Amino acid sequence: MGSAFNLGKIFGIQFRLHYTWFVIFVLITVSLSWQYFPLAYPDWNNSTYWVSGIFTSLLFFTSVVAHELAHSLVGRANGIPVKSITLFIFGGVAHMTREAAHHGAELKMAAAGPISSLVIGGLFFLLHLLLRGISEPIAAMAFWLAQINVVLAVFNLIPGFPLDGGRVFRSLLWRFSGDYTRSTRIATRVGRGVGYLFILGGISIIFLFPGQWFGGLWLAFIGWFLSRTASASYRQAQWQGALQGVTASELMTSDCPVVPSDVTINRLVQEYIFTSGRQCFLVTDEGELKGILTLGDIKSVARSNWEVTQVNSIMTPVEKLKMAYPDQDALSMLEQMDENNINQMPVVSEGRAVGLITRDNLIRFLRTRS
Ligand SMILES: [Zn+2]
């Protein structure tokens, strides 16, 4: 997810605000200040409507943050590290660096969000009861927040992946079948089904109740997002299943041409590329890895300079490389590549480069597996 602002860290977890969040923030604030509060409490003045609307909206998003934080902290306590939480148009999403390794951890992490929303809803309802006779606007805000948090919990408990309920559902299937990929397939199928139902429901609302067209459109929009995310989650799970237990040494290219760092590009092209046809090279001096070089690096140098440019001035130096180890599993390598936005990693054993793993290696392997 691009175009998000960093808000800072809570408990070591980076909080980010996606630009689409402003759309939903404005929508909720306006509908509260313009519609909900004026209809329910006609005798307030105009500024009370707006101040209450803005504060209620902010507290709603604070509740969403608390929901995501509950997922993240319970996840972290169960061995699922969460790097960041992003607020966007459909709520919040926690970015895990890896999926749960055990169904118990997944169940606890998934359930933590809706449970926290129910607790927060209960607390707001209590506040509503306490302040009813003291301040009508604050009691009204608390009442709306109590309702919306319960709605948030119930909505998230719908058993379609990637909703929390879908994760709970998958963890239970996983527990009883022992088959992670199959459980994911079923849970993501249900998730897609839920998404389609939402789209259908949204379109029906638009036709049957034209006055509610916006609500219908919104429901259809959420349905579209859910079905899309469910499909993507299933693909990801398939990859994970296929890459599990496969190591770098099985997938790497081990006959990578080795070139010394002081070779000129001209000589490299003449003596190595034309004869071997390879696209990637390990640059080593006396067996010690100095860097790697790809055809892309060569293309960045004007042909007229090939005679005078040495490999070491255009290679990716070893300090900037991420290394893989021969027994590292393929899934963690793919994650490492995605995280650092790189396409290849040298495989290093006892300080010596023994091969090269490229994104192509991984993708070709995935194709043959599926
Ligand atoms: Zn959740």
Image (cartoon, grey):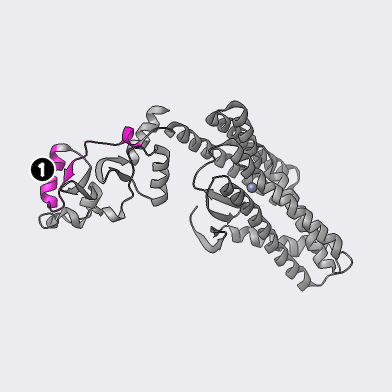
Residue 110 picture location, percent across and down: 63, 43
What amino acid is labelled 1 in the image?
A: Glu
Residue 191 picture location, percent across and down: 61, 37
Left or right: residue 364 compared with residue 159: left
Q: Is residue 160 visible?
A: no
Q: Is residue 25 visible?
A: yes
Relative to 87, residue 355 above or below: above
The answer to whether the beta carbon of the residue marked 1 is less than 8 Å from any atom of ligand 1 is: no
Left or right: residue 1 compared with residue 192: left
Please state which of residues 251 and 226 is positioned toward the viewer in this rendering: 251
Left or right: residue 212 compared with residue 309: right
Please state which of residues 117 and 301 is positioned toward the viewer in this rendering: 117
Give the residue drawn at x 25%, y 43%.
353
State the count of labels: 1
Give the residue drawn at x 34%, y 44%.
324
Which residue is tagged 1? 271
Please state which of residues 88 and 106 is positioned toward the viewer in this rendering: 106
Q: Dot 1: what SS?
A: helix
Please state which of residues 340 and 12 is positioned toward the viewer in this rendering: 12
The crowd level at tag 1 (other Cα within 10 Å; few <14, some 14-19, many 20+) is few
Q: Which residues are magenta?
A: 248-275
Q: What quarter of the picture does the C terminus occupy? A: top left
Give the residue drawn at x 84%, y 69%.
135
Name the residue at the top extreme. Answer: 177
Name the residue at the right extreme. Answer: 133
Is residue 272 inside the magenta stretch? yes
Left or right: residue 56 compared with residue 301: right
Is residue 31 inside the magenta stretch? no
Residue 33 picture location, percent across and down: 75, 65
